[in-house]
Amino acid sequence: TAFRKAGYFVCGAGKIYHEAYKRRSEWDDYLENEGGGKAEKKLNATAKNDGVGGIKFAPLDCQDADLPDYKITDYGIEKLNAAHDKPFFLAVGLHKPHMPWNVPQKYFDLYPLEKIELPKVDEKDLDDVPPMGVKMAKPNGDHAAMLKSGRWKEAVQAYLATITYCDTN
């Protein structure tokens, strides 16, 4: 709103306001159709499943351009390259690396599982944390399920793949 009041052309795309509040009336132009809904569910044949507990990850059988962040980035590039007759404000918010960590298989291939080093974990790590902190850490939550599943390296691989996909955009 402040930029518009100052005479700026205000445009944006993607995950702004964490998508909880659309507030489209505050923009002169906003990318409405990011697409990608079906592509994010098109798991690659190598995917075991869609993750472990609340930690969702899997390689996809799709192209970069099939995912919303690609279209969001293209929108931003288009607006940066456009001729402007007044100052402009551009906001571009990528959805990733928020879960699900689902991106094309080629990004997973950049991080072979045998080369991923997991951090050392002190079994007594939470011993000096107050009870409320331990409750917030949820020691019996998603991470415990991940350890039990034996798929921690796969989750790290997926996160690295997703970050690389974002960087590529």
Image (cartoon, helix red, strand yellow):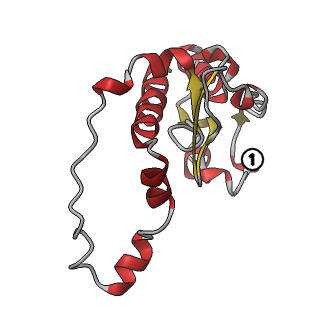
From what the image shows, is residue 120 above or below residue 114? below
Q: Residues within 10 Å of mark 1 (few under 14, many from 20)?
A: few
SS class of the residue under badge 1?
Answer: helix
- Where residue 151 appears, as percent x and y from the top left, is 46, 41
For the point 60% across and 52% down, which residue is it? 18
- Where residue 142 appears, as percent x and y from the top left, is 50, 59
- Quarter-wise, where is residue 144 in the image? bottom left
For the point 22% across and 70% down, which residue is it? 124
Q: Residue tagged by mark 1?
A: 24
Q: Is residue 1 visible?
A: no
From what the image shows, is residue 116 above or below residue 147? above
For the point 70% across and 57% down, which residue is it? 21
- Where residue 20 appears, as percent x and y from the top left, is 68, 57
- Quarter-wise, where is residue 82 in the image? top right
- Where residue 13 appears, as percent x and y from the top left, is 64, 35
The residue nearer to you, when weighing 92 against 132, is 132
Q: Is residue 51 left or right of residue 158?
A: right
For the point 60% across and 16% down, which residue is it? 64
Residue type at tag 1: Arg
The residue nearer to you, when weighing 58 against 22, is 58
